[in-house]
Amino acid sequence: MSASEGETKDAVIAGDVEPGFEGVRDAFAHNFEVGREVGSAFCLHVGGRKVVDIYGGTFDREGSRPYDQNTLQLVFSTTKGATAACANLLAQRGQLDLNAPVSTYWPEFAQSGKADIPVLLLLSHQAGLPAIDASLSPQEVQAWDPIVAALAEQQPLWEPGTAHGYHALTYGWLVGEVVRRVSGRSLGTYFAEEIAQPLGLAFWIGLPEDLEHRVSPIVGGLVPQGGAADEMPADFSTTLLARALNVGGAFSDAGWMNRPDWHAAEVPAANGITNATSLSRLYAGLIGTVEGGPAESILTSEQVDQARQVRTFGADQVFLSLGFPMEQHIGQGFWISSPFAPFGGEASFGHTGAGGSYGFADPENNLAVGYVMNKMQSGMLGDPRARRLIRACYAAVGAVPKYF
């Protein structure tokens, strides 16, 4: 059944909703009714079949055109799920041993006492490398080699394996360089050729120039403003989280997320550009087959089970620098459903992104979800838009989400 188009406050909601999933559309529309959205899209696959694929609002704050099925969106750290999929695929194929030292594949990484750090610690944010001491220009970071060299030289900020802390940006270069050394291809190219193209995804880590006009500009910023700023310490700029979000000082320009040069670069932790349909289809394709996709899932059930084993313990050292004792559940590159990142089912895995985007799979309930938006939600305690949509999805399939 096609979702009827109609005014929802100032938004037109369009797309497709199968019978029984109307509650998901209602939840999506409610986010516009209460003024939480400018433009966004949501998709749900159940058993590899797309049952909800909706979008609404406007492409930009000015309302220059509708937010539609052709709109692409920067999804920040939701990109990390795609990067994790690449590493897990290489491991599944026997090309990458996650327990082997990183220096086995990347010899330069052995500097500064890092010779024995296993690849798994990069994926689980336990390597102690969320920030670097070197200063780099945006051009150097975009060029890849300078930031990778700086990470190879960097001394860990804590003893690797004894704690974890969110490697907000460095995760992508660390894991991406291992993928490059093993496969001979950049992370963006490997993802495109081995995952995105077989699944038919509109998902890029390194956007082609001719697609830039389809990218909806982000409304808002990474650092909370207004009332949400009360959650942040007065000296935020000196915290480890600030250093992790502004690696080498290259991200000091607040508008970087809307610049074409950053969209074209490969920042595998933070600059994936996609849509809700492709995010949902990615996760559906990781745990099973999808309509019109490969005859087998991208990852075997055994690899998925390994990927979603929780590898972390204790408080996140990066968020602790803000005074927030958060305890993420992190597996082999993916976040596992937890109070911090509630995806729904207890077995769910995926990744969220700054401002609200997310993608995840729930193998137990055989569903996959993708959500993208251009209006960033500021705050440290979760996004009510996402929670409302997830609750509606689980209600539609007759399941009860955890951590809600």
Image (tube, grey):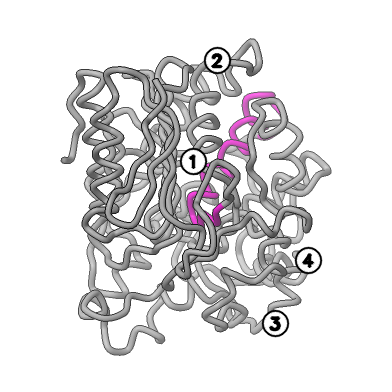
Between marks 3 and 2 in the image, the one whose residue lies nearer the viewer: 2
Looking at the picture, how far across and down is residue 21, in whole percent?
A: 29, 24
Q: Which amino acid does label 2 sit on?
A: Thr
Q: What residue type is labelled 3?
A: Ser
Residue identifier under label 4: 145
Residue at 29%, 69% (x, y): give it.
320
Looking at the picture, how far across and down is residue 2, in whole percent?
A: 41, 25
Counting residues from the start of the chain, the first of labels 4 and 2 encountered is: 4
- Contact, CB < 8 Å: mark 2 with mark 1? no
Q: Give the range drawn in magenta.
A: 73-96
Occupied quadrant, residue 331: top left
209 to the left or right of 119:
right
316 to the left or right of 100:
left
Residue identifier under label 3: 137
Residue identifier under label 1: 276
Q: Is the magenta stretch mostly helix, strand or loop?
A: helix
Residue at 47%, 70% (x, y): give it.
62
Is residue 79 highlighted in magenta?
A: yes
- Judged from the image, the secondary structure of the residue bearing numbered disc 4 is helix
Badge 4 crowding class, 10 Å Cα cut-off, few under 14, some 14 to 19, many 20 or more, is few
Tell me how far mark 1 sits from mark 4, CA to CA.
31 Å
Badge 2 crowding class, 10 Å Cα cut-off, few under 14, some 14 to 19, many 20 or more, is some
Counting residues from the start of the chain, the first of labels 1 and 4 encountered is: 4
Tell me how far mark 2 sits from mark 1, CA to CA.
18 Å
Residue identifier under label 2: 289
- Judged from the image, the secondary structure of the residue bearing numbered disc 2 is loop
